[in-house]
Amino acid sequence: MKTVEAGLSEEGDAKLSVVRLKVSALSHLLTQDHATLQATFQLAARGTKAEGVRLEVIPVPADAWCPECKSGMTVTELNDTCSACEGSVIATSGQPEVVLHELVVQG
């Protein structure tokens, strides 16, 4: 919410209508149904400028590493396996799990 509030401070009195988040394919957030994410967002947004706005989640591919065959790859789902050996993959460090992508405001 702090990042959303900071982004809105640049928009003056414009009314926020949508918050768009980019979420890594390896994030456990993507295992939740959209209604649960929306409800959780609404709870966090209470009393802020984001109260009552819609949340949109955009899944994005993530870089991963296979410890079995020591290969790097890009995955699009949490349960993806290594394309070379079908082993389990782990997220590589340095990638944020969730990024505020866009605030949609009504002028």
Image: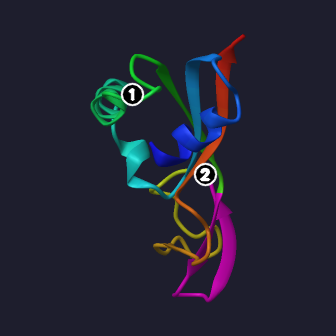
Q: Residues within 10 Å of mark 2 (few under 14, many from 20)?
A: some
Residue occupying the point 33% across, 23% down: 35
- Secondary structure predominantly adopted by residues drawn in magenta: strand
- How many residues crowd around disc 1 within 10 Å: few (fewer than 14), some, or many (20 or more)? some
Residue 17 or residue 71, whichever sits in front = 17
| Quarter occupied by the N terminus | top left
Residue 69 figure quarter: bottom right
> Is residue 1 left or right of 20 when viewed as pictured?
left
Q: Tell whether position 79 is magenta.
A: no
Q: Which mark is residue 34?
A: 1
Farthest residue, direction front: 12
Q: Nearer the viewer, residue 101 or 52?
A: 52
Q: Is 28 displayed left or right of 86 in the figure?
A: left
Residue under label 2, please give it. Answer: 76
Camera-nearest residue between 13 and 20: 13
Q: Secondary structure at mark 1?
A: helix
Side of 77 relative to 1 (left or right): right
| For residue 98, above or below residue 43 | below
Circle 2 — which element?
loop
Q: Position of residue 74 (x, y in %)?
A: 68, 63
Q: Amino acid at mark 1?
A: His
Q: Which residues are magenta?
A: 62-75
